Image: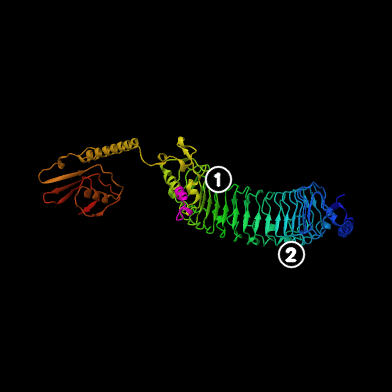
Amino acid sequence: MKYEQLPGKRRSSLQIVSCRLANAMRALWWLVPLLLGPPAGAMCPSQCMCDDASLVASCENAQIGVMPIQLNPEVETIRLKGNSITTLELSLSFYARVRSLDVSFNLLQNLGSGLFQEQSRLAELNVSNNEITMIFPEAFSGLTELRVLDLSNNQISSASEGSVWKGLESLWELNLSHNRLDALAAKVRPKSSTSDDDNDCAPLRNLRTLTLDGNLFSFPPSNCLAHLDSLRQLGLADNRLTFIGDEDFPAALSDLQALNLQGNQISSLSPNCFANLSQLHALDLADNNITFVPTNSLARLKSLQDLDLSGNPITRIAPLAFQALFELRRLRVSRLSELEHIDPRALAENVRLEEVRLELCPQLKRLPPRLFHSNPLLTRVALRGNALQTIAPGDLPHRQLRYLALADNPFRCNCSLLWLWKLARNSAQKIASRNPAYGNHTPAWAATAGGASCWEPLPVRGIPVYKAPEETVGCEASWGTVLMVTGVVLSLFTVTCAILFYCGGGGRWCRPETTDTPSSRSNGLKDTIVLQHYPQPPQNNMYHQHHLLHHHHMGLGPPHMWTDPDQVVPPEYEYSTTDGGVISVKKPSTSNSLGVYV
């Protein structure tokens, strides 16, 4: 019968027997050297290595099935990694002074109540990679000085019943990753609870690091997080989160510095979901279902320095996508399989940006010009594995970069890459000359053109850009190209001259039509100009009629006009000049209310 399954009285009696047996074994361990002399070292199992000077006992991968009880009772470090131990009952009580215990990669199935009652000095406990399915209440109640607890890679499905975390008031780091947890505290508090100390997570109030990666959380455990006001790092990667709401990260997390949400199914974030994380420095949102940069949500993170949005189905990075992130240093937007366009103003407000990783985006064929124009501190840029065919010298701040990666892009090695070819050749010569004046300040990427290689034309496919023949990347035009361009220019010039000549010579296309009427012929006293077929504007067209007079060099000033909008303006007028230069207007036969005063 297992220890945790025994009735209460029977269990207490076994604990008493265990303690008495432990004391007897300690006394025997000290008596053996007196009785046996120098061969006392035989107390260390043959599969183990024991150092009594440093108080370390190591039995790693020793193929043992139980925890040895014949080790030095004063031992402070015990390593039992990689064995077949199934229980720690009745064995730990022999080592009350142990400070570090590693029983990882064994076959432990549970942690019973009061299991570590004698280990008040234990500071580090590693029980990862076992077969633990359940943690009993008050299993850690004796670990008053424990700082690090690793329970990762087990099969724990419940850690929210009773006082599971009781006694861990000194704990700084708790690793529960890769288990089967969906809660850390009871979702509904008992009605008798009147204090925050009654919460299951209250003993963890000094926790600095909490790792919950690889579990079954559908929502962040906010009911537990509300009591972790000392938390600095929180890991929720590889869970089942789909949405981040306003209350998922409570105000108690105001000192949180790192948040890992990678590998979930997050498709949307509320605008205020990070409002309480004023001190957050690093945020990982990689490998989710985010289709656009959540600008409004990120703008709340005034202290953010490291952001990762890689592996999301983002198609476009909009202007000011990272608005208000004035402290941003490192940006990762790699593995965006749908990304096609980046606005040149996307990074306009990130003045402290030092590193950008924009890699493995197979739809990105062009880098926007002057994308990094507003980033004077940028020194590292990675553009590997995209679909870039060319890159202009103004696209990159290459004079300030210390690291540049351009490998695995289908570059066309022509005169558009001549600047990169020359830069690589000059940098290689400077480095080879080892001139202290400039050789020591030449970045290594410049000598190899950042690893860029040619994809076209075919004769140089796979050849590094800096090794391409000069005639391939040269910008000198061939005779055939010169003749073709010259022929096109001459043809356009000939056509233009023909059109101008035809219009200037009075061709019918360029000459306004006139009506040959008796009044239009010169009779020695006056000339009559008849304007016909001009489109009339609706209602008030008096200004247009005057404009026609001015267009025919009549020399009229701006007219004073009046019109009746109900009357129809006649389609044509006749204007006559006498020998004395007097202008007269011949009114049409139909009467209207239009008058012109010159």
Mark 2 or mark 1: whose residue is earlier in sequence: 2
Q: Please name the predominant secondary structure of the magenta segment in the image.
A: helix
At x 52%, y 59%, the residue is 326
Q: Are marks 2 and 1 in contact (CB under 8 Å)?
A: no
Q: Is residue 434 above or below residue 492?
A: below
Q: Is residue 389 visible?
A: no
> Residue 322's x, y, as percent?
52, 54
At label 1, the amino acid type is Leu
At label 2, the amino acid type is Ser
What is the span of residues highlighted in magenta in the rendered image? 427-440
Q: Dot 2 corresponds to which residue?
A: 195
Marks 2/1: CA distance? 48 Å
Q: Is residue 207 above or below residue 385?
A: below
Q: Nearer the viewer, residue 220 or 555?
A: 220
Q: How many marks on residues? A: 2
Q: Quadrant of the C terminus?
A: bottom left
Q: Is residue 231 visible?
A: yes
> Residue 31's x, y, as percent?
88, 59
Judged from this view, the residue extending furthest toward the front is: 38
Q: Secondary structure at mark 2?
A: loop
Q: Dot 1 corresponds to which residue?
A: 336
Label 2 crowding class (10 Å Cα cut-off): few <14, some 14-19, many 20+? few
Q: Is residue 87 left or right of residue 247?
A: right
Judged from this view, the residue extending furthest toward the bottom is: 195
Q: Secondary structure at mark 1?
A: loop
> Residue 119's x, y, as percent?
80, 59
